[in-house]
Amino acid sequence: SLGLVGSEMCIRDRFREHNEQSRKLIGKDFISKTVQRYETTTRYLEEFIKKEYQLSDIALNNLEANFISKFDAFLKIEKGCAQNSAITRLKNLKKIIRIALENDWIKKDPFAYYRFKLKETYPEFLTMDEIKIILAKEFTIKRVEQVRDVFIFCSYTGLAFSDVKDLSPEHLLKDNKGELWIKIFLSFHSSVFSSKNLHRLNTSLEKSMIQIKFRKTMFLGLAGYSFQLSK
């Protein structure tokens, strides 16, 4: 049986404990987006355990290799995760298993013979002409116009929306030449940049300084703040 056995360590509780600790370390060892991802994975795992085993939690020592493959299938079928998204969730789970192994809570690794198979993706990029068309488009609905402005902002800076939504005035600064910069921590950066773009990216570990040069003045209302960014 996969059920709870006495006071054995259980997967859901260890996941929650990890998430609570990680949330306390946001801004130090973790960023908010990463913690949110772990929390979502925990919720999916709880739903899976309840649906598949009619239990609220499962003892770590009772996890078998087929638990992983069943959870993988649950993510794809019930939660609509694509291959790479499902792998991200499984890697979250694997971290908890690794912690359990390091602490001698379990003796056997259910991931021992499980292999992740990432699907290669081929993202398409907007041309500058396409960006200009979007930039010139007029909208009668203010909310839609703001969505466009934020999209253009992301396009010029290379920032993901998850990074942009956390911007605040303290992230804005000027260098000794009077040029405007945004200074933030980025979780990752996968965009392609070239000298022809209207920005420059300098990366040192997870710290990024992104210089913004717009061809027009933009007013962005983000997280309750208004920014005027101009060339």
Image (tube, rainbow, N blue to C red):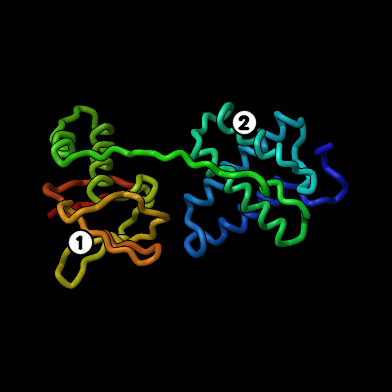
Nearest the viewer among 73 and 59 is 73
Closest to the camera, between mark 1 and mark 2, is 2
- Is residue 87 visible in this depiction of the protein? yes
Picture disc at residue 180: 1
| Type of amino acid under label 1 | Leu
Name which residue lies at 16% across and 41% down. Answer: 128
Q: Would you call the spot at circle 1 few (<14 residues within 10 Å), some (14-19), or many (20 or more)?
A: some
Nearest the viewer among 173 and 80 is 80
Residue 97 screen position, x and y as percent: 68, 52
Picture disc at residue 74: 2
Q: Earlier in the sequence, mark 1 or mark 2?
A: 2
82 is higher (above) or lower (below) than 175: above
Total numbered circles: 2
Quadrant location, the C terminus: bottom left
| Type of amino acid under label 2 | Phe
Name which residue lies at 71% across and 41% down. Answer: 65
Asked whether, in this view, residue 92 is left or right of residue 191, the answer is: right
Residue 183 screen position, x and y as percent: 31, 62
Could you tell me which secondary element the residue under label 2 belongs to? Answer: helix
Picture disc at residue 62: none
* Alpha carbon distance from label 1 to label 2: 47 Å
* Residue at far bottom of view: 176
Nearest the viewer among 135 and 80 is 80
Could you tell me which secondary element the residue under label 1 belongs to? Answer: strand
Name which residue lies at 40% across and 62% down. Answer: 206
